[in-house]
Amino acid sequence: MKDYIDYFIPNWLIITGAIGQMFTALIYPYIRHHVFDWYNDIEQLTELNQQIVRTYGKYIIGLNFTFGLIGILFTEQLKGMTDLAVAMTGLIAFYWVGKIATQFLHYSMYQIPNKRIYKIGEVGMNLLFVLFAVTYAALFILNLIGYLQTR
């Protein structure tokens, strides 16, 4: 089973995804400020709700960056078919699948400013999100199968 994981999910793919996740964490504040004018929008909320929104924004940045670090530092362990590999790849997979589902089901009406760089960025970011979701969903499934076969 380990051969299947190595064949379908090579280390370079996990590391590429990890770098992408770290990139999303670093670019996220720029996107919120320059593309969505997020900071001005949240000023309309009560102070408590502003703090909640800012806190969740920081959680997102922290999770994206941490998932990237995990991918870089623990590439082989993420393919280990252990209970922890199943749990970690499942967590990351569900996070990114949830991100995509939320974006396309609930954010479909938002408008990106009509600048070419933002349109290219939108496509690029969506492709990254799909890469993360597919990579980690495949890792989760392969890890789960391998884990269950050894039990």
Image: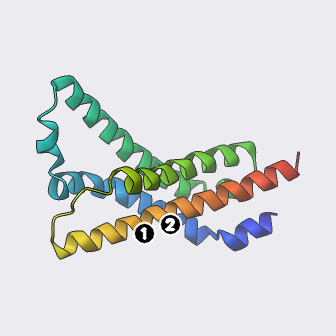
Q: Is residue 27 left or right of residue 13?
A: left
Looking at the picture, how far across and down is residue 82, in whole percent?
Answer: 75, 47
Please state which of residues 108 and 73 is positioned toward the viewer in this rendering: 108
**Contact check, label 1 and label 2, Cβ < 8 Å:** yes
Please name the residue that numbered disc 1 is placed on: 127
Residue 107 in view, yes or no: yes
Residue 75 visible (yes or no): no
Residue 54 lies, in percent from the top left, at: 25, 36
The quadrant where residue 5 appears = bottom right
Q: Position of residue 113 (x, y in %)?
A: 16, 64
The image quadrant where one finds the C terminus is top right
Q: Is residue 120 left or right of residue 113?
A: right
Relative to 47, residue 100 above or below: below
Q: Residues within 10 Å of mark 1 (few under 14, many from 20)?
A: few
Q: Secondary structure at mark 1?
A: helix
What numbered label is drawn on residue 82?
A: none
- The residue type indicated by label 1 comes to Leu
Report the side of 80 relative to 64 (left or right).
right
Out of 67 and 92, give the one closest to the viewer.
92
Q: Name the residue located 47 percent from the left edge and 55 percent from the top edge.
A: 68
Question: Residue at coordinates 36% horizontally, 60% vertically from top-left?
Answer: 23
Count the numbered circles shown: 2
Amino acid residing under circle 2: Leu
Residue 131 marker:
2
Residue drawn where x is 22% and y is 69% of the image: 118
